[in-house]
Image: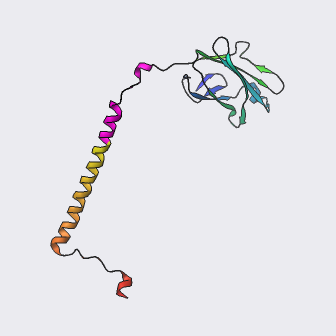
Amino acid sequence: MELVKNIFFNTDRLTANNTVKISYTGKFFQDDSNHVYIHYGFGNEWSGLVDAEMTKTELGFQIEIHLLDSETFNFCLKNEKDEWDNNDGKNYIFTIEHPDISLISLDNTETNSLRKLRKSYLFSKKIKLAIYKILIYVPRLISGNYKKRKHITDEL
């Protein structure tokens, strides 16, 4: 998903405690820079400040970053010539979403029901196999055509 011109994420939402892949196709990629570094941090104070080199690919400069449990993800970029792409002095700032914990089920009723469903599925498969064998082998027993076939090597 493109949130800002020439900045792409592999997801439509940035969520806390998840990894996100960032692709950059901005001026450094277009100017054919060899090395691009991302300077990033979290929140208004840019806590957890990191400088990391991005990998150059055919799709742009890319990197995977683990998002911390913060309100915002902030970054700017620089190349090997110490030139900066900081979104015209505003930096790239994105809101980090936090999943609603109330939607997460904490009891084991769902896993127990899944186990029961799996057991009933296996039981139905066994019943179907038993019925299949009865339909195939009972007529053979009645007709007397139940003997094993001889192998070709036995006849020679």
- The percent position of residue 10, horizontal first and vertical second, equals 58, 30
Q: Residue furthest bottom?
A: 156
Placement of the N terminus among the 4 image quadrants: top right
Q: Up-down: is 55 above or below 138? A: above
Please report the residue visible at 56 percent of the width from the left and 24 percent of the height from the top: 17
- The percent position of residue 155, horizontal first and vertical second, equals 35, 86
Q: Up-down: is 45 above or below 68? A: above
Q: Residue furthest left?
A: 142
In this rendered view, identify the residue nearer to me: 44 or 95: 44
Magenta part of the chain: 97-117
Splitting the image into 4 quarters, where does residue 102 fall? top left
Please report the residue visible at 78 percent of the width from the left and 20 percent of the height from the top: 84
Placement of the C terminus among the 4 image quadrants: bottom left
Please report the residue visible at 33 percent of the width from the left and 37 percent of the height from the top: 114
Q: Is 152 displayed left or right of 24 in the figure? A: left
- The percent position of residue 98, horizontal first and vertical second, equals 51, 19
- The percent position of residue 25, horizontal first and vertical second, equals 70, 28
Q: Is 91 displayed left or right of 12 in the figure? A: right
In this rendered view, identify the residue nearer to me: 131 or 68: 68
Q: Residue furthest top?
A: 44
110 part of magenta stretch: yes
